[in-house]
Image (spheres, rainbow, N blue to C red):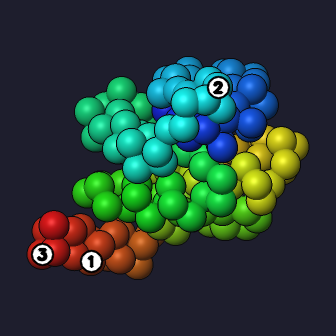
Amino acid sequence: MRVALAFDHRGVKLRERVFEVVTGLGHEPVDLGTDRPEPRIDYPDKAREVGEAIREGRAERAVLICGSGVGASVAACKIAGIRAAICHDMYSAHQGVEHDDMNVLCLGSEVVGAELAADLVRVFLGARFDGGERYVRRLHKIEEMEKAHG
């Protein structure tokens, strides 16, 4: 799977470990930067890049990291077709994919350490959408909301 990886200036501290996990699992990372803490990079710019990578088919999923994960999640969800969530626990990281077809995992570098981030990325990338009728019905409702309010 091609996985877009994007970090703002605060999220960059998890960069190396996240890349190790993605490549170690046999996935192809799509590097959307940044790789240094300076200059400051605004998380909405990274969220837009992640959304475009998924919408254009350059990646199937993404990991987006800022300081708290909150801003990244809020920004990414503004893009139609992007289902991003902040997940700092294992259950949410897999259940978000299984039930909600989440395609962007958002993490906060000031909230989780490198090893928990690695575990969350593993669980996120290992999960598959259930495809059950109730989950598909709910996704259609989300798509209708995007159309009505986009």
In depth, the one of 72 and 143 nearer the eye is 72
Residue 143 x, y percent position in the rendering? 23, 68
Q: Secondary structure at mark 1?
A: helix
> In this rendering, is residue 1 above or below 104?
above
- Label ID, residue 121: none
Q: Amino acid at mark 3?
A: Ala
In depth, the one of 55 and 13 nearer the eye is 13
Q: Which residue is mark 1?
A: 141
Left or right of 49 on screen, residue 21: right
Q: Secondary structure at mark 3?
A: helix
Mark 3: few, some, or many residues within 10 Å (few <14, many ≥20)? few
Residue 14 x, y percent position in the rendering? 74, 37
Q: Nearer the viewer, mark 2 or mark 3?
A: 2
Q: Which residue is mark 3?
A: 148
Q: Amino acid at mark 2?
A: Arg
Q: Amino acid at mark 1?
A: Lys
Residue 119 x, y percent position in the rendering? 80, 47
Q: Earlier in the sequence, mark 2 or mark 1?
A: 2
- For the point 83% across and 42% down, which residue is it? 114
